[in-house]
């Protein structure tokens, strides 16, 4: 037996509060105007947050490391220009390459000559830093060569510095020079280093001069076919600073025009990606919002006579969202654009409150008010259940999700407040705003059909849901397919991303290397950490069969500081003067002219008295070498930090390869203090795990919270379960689409699940509240059905407007955002089916109740 419900419109404090806005419309309008003015001022304080910290979990070390890399390391803020020769140019490759090099040089000169460009751009490069590498080797590495030798190379060096070893090397050199054809460069090399000391260093120092795969192995970054040249431009600020990015891109375009770069230019890198994303998202949002408003207005024109219904419905929602953002600005003034958009959409669900409130007028005009009599109570229950879901989302580890849930909840609450205050005030005015809304769309025929076929509708609906669940349970594959490719977050066409992949293929680079962020309190301990990390990664990769092709970091350019003190003591023990004397004696005993090696003795003496070992401070003086692994000098941090790039010869966009590489390398460095594996592939790996963990946990908590709230509101187990029926159908339909159509879930479209939960539970709440009101009025079936028609119209219209808002997202160019529209549209279909079934169940209850009160009046 259903527990009786008190009439919320009965005399008392609550009813007097609800009646106050209609009796004091001027006061309400003044209060609203003041709140709007204050809110506009508060919202103007927001700053657009484009840094990665706002999107990631604060407790996640990999995310924090990636955020630091994006902010502080110049390697992450590069603009790639791939200048190509026209397809119609059939000149010899060498001539085309020369023209491309000349074009790149003109672009570089134009950028350096322009004061504005010079203030924005830190570097322009189109050739390997060959001179800088030679300078580093000559001034830093070669004098400290002993520090670079590992133990086996050091033992070999000591053997070569003995009289026997010197005689052996000179004898080999004599044989080499006596062979036919060996002259010129071979003789010069042998004269410079007769003991072959530099070959012992080649394995370490070769990384300094390792070229890209270029045309005829030249220093310029011309592709192997000679038809493209790569120009890399480094900016002085992160790509996330959109004002800076727009200025830099404009300067480069002007420089290309002035340089007469008529050849096709493809843009890639962080700055090009940021500009393309901003432009596409802004365009999509403007088109989506404008189109949604126009379609919604058309829907309201079909539902009601006159144009005033839609603006009247939208007004409290817009003001509510504005006030919600203003309230959140008291907590923080940093806001990401995606967070703002999703939060506004969540708050925009408050349009349902206005639609259902205005349905009271519709009911009154039709003489069937009782179904809407308890609408305020139903609206309050709907807000509490939806609000509980948003509060649960606040428990996630993602700051962006926590923020938009909080702002959405504030906006939704404010929308409810203004629905109950502003709308009554406006309706009480002697103007067009106060005129009754005359419905144009009548659902009497649909409602009559449901009543006449309520039993088949219930049976078919429940059978359909059961069959879908059974079929889904038997379908092989993951329960919920999760999207692992973060490229879906980028708008189509993804030209900057494709250019990056193209550059990687052309020049033999890793498209997306794994990154290891290194941090330590001192420069020496940082370099030592890099050596340990490289050793562990190579060992782990060998055990797991992961094809690691290169590891570039501080250990590639600097010696291990832990061995420096021991190596210096061992070098001193060799006695440089004795070694020089032994070498002179060995040369005298050979057929070589001693004058040919006059300077070599001084080199040996200096080598055995090495200067202090090179450090990060020395490396920082060579930005062409250190730019890929060290942070900017103007990006201070509590510790010293650096970057290690791990290239894997496997497509990390394939989940199997990615998971194996990330798992093995992360396990290798997880207990190494200061070393953190990160990068976009790692973020995708972690995102899958985090989403799956949060999805299960938050879904269970949300369901529990909704059940508790509904139980407190209805105090009837049967009605509590019935209220969840539309939501159950919506989730089953979404599940079916995900399993059978290839739809994958990502961080964006998962937002649709709490939205569907809110809308689905609201449908159940309004239907049950309406039927309860009819029972409380003791109405017979004909009258109660007429009254329920207006409620069903309000539910249908609110679902349509919400569906239009989200469905329009399906046409955006960003796959992740478009999938949000797809998921919600699919869920909306299930929601309407579930609402139809619930309507049949509730109408049956009204009929049975009315038969006992008035006799058999059911059709």
Image: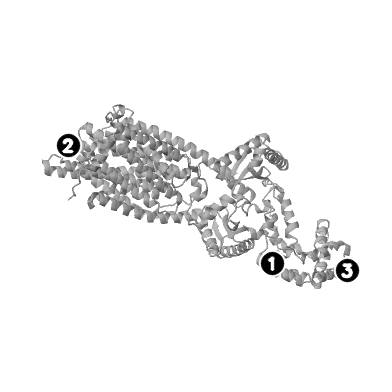
Residue under label 2, please give it.
Answer: 782
Give yes or no for contact between labels 1 and 3 (Cβ–Cβ under 8 Å): no
Query: Could one spot residue 456 in this view of the protein?
Result: no
Mark 1 to mark 3: distance in Å? 34 Å
Query: Could one spot residue 719 in this view of the protein?
Result: yes
Residue 700: percent from left, percent from top = 35, 55
Mark 1 to mark 2: distance in Å? 96 Å
Residue under label 1, please give it.
Answer: 564
Q: Given this view, does label 1 or label 3 mark the residue nearer the observer? A: 1
476 up-or-down from 806: above or below: below
> In which quarter of the view is residue 83 placed?
top right
Residue under label 3, please give it.
Answer: 588
Q: In the image, is 104 to the left or to the right of 532?
A: right
**Which of these two is toward me, 37 or 416?**
37
- Dot 2: element: helix
Q: In the image, is 447 to the left or to the right of 827?
A: left
Upstream in sequence: badge 1 or badge 2 = 1
Q: Given this view, does label 1 or label 2 mark the residue nearer the observer? A: 1
Residue 210: percent from left, percent from top = 68, 55
**Which of these two is toward me, 230 or 456?**
230
Q: In the image, is 201 to the left or to the right of 732?
A: right
Mark 3 to mark 2: distance in Å? 123 Å
The residue carrying pointer 3 sits among few (fewer than 14), some (14 to 19) or many (20 or more) residues within 10 Å by Cα, namely: few
- Dot 3: element: helix
Give yes or no for contact between labels 1 and 2 (Cβ–Cβ under 8 Å): no
Upstream in sequence: badge 3 or badge 2 = 3
Q: In the image, is 5 to the left or to the right of 795?
A: left
> In which quarter of the view is residue 261 placed?
top right
795 up-or-down from 520: above or below: above
Residue 360: percent from left, percent from top = 25, 36
Question: Which scheme is used to colour this image of the protein?
Answer: one colour
**Which of these two is toward me, 539 or 420?**
420
């Amino acid at each position: 037996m259903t527990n009786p419900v008190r009439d919320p419109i009965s005399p008392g404090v609550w009813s007097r509060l609800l009646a106050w806005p209609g009796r004091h419309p001027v006061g309400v309008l003044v209060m609203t105007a003041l709140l709007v003015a204050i809110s506009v001022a508060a919202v103007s304080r927001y700053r657009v947050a484009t840094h990665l910290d706002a999107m990631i979990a604060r407790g996640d070390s990999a995310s924090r490391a990636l955020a630091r890399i994006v902010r502080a390391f110049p390697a992450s803020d590069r603009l790639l220009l791939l200048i190509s020769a026209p397809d119609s140019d059939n000149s010899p490759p060498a001539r085309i390459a020369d023209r491309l090099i000349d074009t790149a040089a003109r672009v570089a000169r134009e950028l350096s000559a322009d004061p504005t460009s010079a203030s924005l751009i830190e570097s322009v490069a189109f050739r390997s830093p060959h001179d800088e590498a030679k300078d580093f080797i000559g001034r830093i590495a070669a004098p400290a060569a002993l520090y670079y030798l590992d133990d086996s190379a050091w033992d070999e060096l000591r053997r070569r510095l003995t009289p026997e070893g010197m005689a052996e090397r000179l004898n080999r050199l004599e044989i080499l020079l006596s062979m036919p054809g060996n002259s010129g460069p071979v003789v010069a090399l042998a004269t410079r280093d007769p003991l072959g000391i530099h070959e012992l260093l080649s394995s370490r120092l070769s990384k300094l001069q390792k070229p890209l795969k270029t045309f005829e192995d030249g220093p310029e970054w011309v592709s192997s076919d000679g038809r493209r040249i790569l120009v890399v431009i480094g900016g002085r600020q992160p790509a996330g600073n959109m004002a800076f990015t727009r200025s830099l891109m404009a300067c480069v375009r002007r420089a290309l025009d002035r340089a007469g770069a008529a050849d096709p230019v493809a843009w890639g890198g962080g700055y090009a990606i940021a500009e393309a994303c901003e432009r596409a998202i802004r365009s999509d949002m403007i088109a989506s919002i404008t189109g949604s408003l126009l379609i919604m207005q058309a829907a309201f024109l079909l539902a009601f006579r006159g144009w005033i219904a839609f603006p009247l419905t939208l007004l409290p929602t817009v003001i509510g969202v504005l006030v919600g953002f203003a309230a959140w600005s008291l907590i923080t003034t940093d806001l990401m654009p995606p967070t703002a958009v999703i939060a506004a959409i969540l708050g925009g669900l408050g349009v349902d409150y206005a639609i259902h409130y205005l349905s009271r007028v519709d009911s009154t005009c039709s003489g069937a008010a009782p179904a809407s009599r308890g609408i305020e109570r139903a609206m309050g229950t709907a807000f509490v259940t939806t609000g509980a879901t948003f509060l649960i989302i606040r428990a996630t580890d993602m700051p962006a999700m926590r923020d938009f849930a909080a702002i959405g909840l504030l906006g939704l609450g404010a929308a409810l407040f203004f629905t109950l205050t502003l709308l009554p005030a406006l309706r009480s005015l002697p103007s067009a705003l106060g005129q009754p809304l005359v419905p144009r769309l009548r659902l009497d025929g649909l409602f009559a059909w449901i009543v006449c076929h309520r039993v088949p509708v219930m049976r078919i609906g429940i059978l359909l849901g059961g069959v879908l669940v059974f079929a889904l349970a038997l379908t092989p594959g993951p329960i919920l397919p999760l999207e692992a490719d973060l490229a879906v977050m980028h708008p189509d066409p993804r030209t900057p991303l494709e250019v990056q992949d193209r550059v990687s293929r052309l020049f033999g680079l890793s498209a997306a290397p794994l990154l290891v962020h290194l941090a330590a309190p001192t420069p020496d301990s940082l370099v030592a950490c890099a050596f340990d990390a490289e050793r562990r990664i190579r060992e782990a990769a060998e055990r797991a069969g992961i094809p690691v092709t290169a590891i570039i970091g501080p250990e590639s350019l600097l010696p291990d500081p832990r061995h420096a003190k021991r190596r210096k003591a061992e070098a001193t023990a060799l006695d440089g003067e004795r070694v020089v004397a032994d070498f002179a004696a060995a040369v005298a005993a050979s057929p070589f002219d001693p004058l040919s090696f006059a300077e070599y003795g001084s080199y040996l003496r200096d080598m055995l008295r090495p200067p202090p070992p090179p450090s990060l401070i020395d490396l920082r003086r060579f930005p062409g070498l250190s730019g890929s692994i060290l942070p900017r000098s103007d990006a201070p941090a509590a510790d010293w930090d650096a970057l290690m790039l791990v290239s894997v010869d496997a497509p990390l966009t394939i989940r199997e390869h990615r998971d194996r590489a990330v798992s093995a390398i992360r396990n290798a460095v997880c207990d190494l203090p200061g070393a953190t594996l990160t990068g976009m592939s790692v973020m995708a790996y972690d995102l899958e795990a985090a989403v799956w963990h949060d999805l299960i946990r938050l879904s269970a908590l949300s369901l529990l919270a909704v059940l508790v709230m509904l139980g407190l509101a209805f105090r009837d187990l049967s009605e509590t379960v019935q209220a969840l029926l539309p939501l159950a159908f919506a989730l089953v339909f979404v599940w079916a689409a995900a399993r059978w159509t290839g739809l994958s879930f990502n961080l964006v479209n998962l937002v649709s699940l709490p939205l569907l939960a809110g809308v689905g539970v609201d449908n159940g709440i309004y239907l049950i509240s309406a039927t309860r009101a009819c029972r409380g009025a003791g109405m017979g079936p004909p009258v109660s059905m007429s009254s329920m028609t207006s409620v069903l119209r309000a539910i249908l219209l609110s679902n349509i407007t919400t569906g239009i808002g989200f469905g329009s997202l399906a046409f955006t160019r960003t796959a992740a955002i478009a999938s949000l529209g797809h998921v919600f549209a699919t869920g909306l279909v299930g929601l309407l089916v579930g609402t139809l079934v619930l309507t049949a169940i509730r109408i049956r209850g009204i009929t049975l109740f009315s038969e006992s009160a008035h006799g058999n009046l059911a059709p």
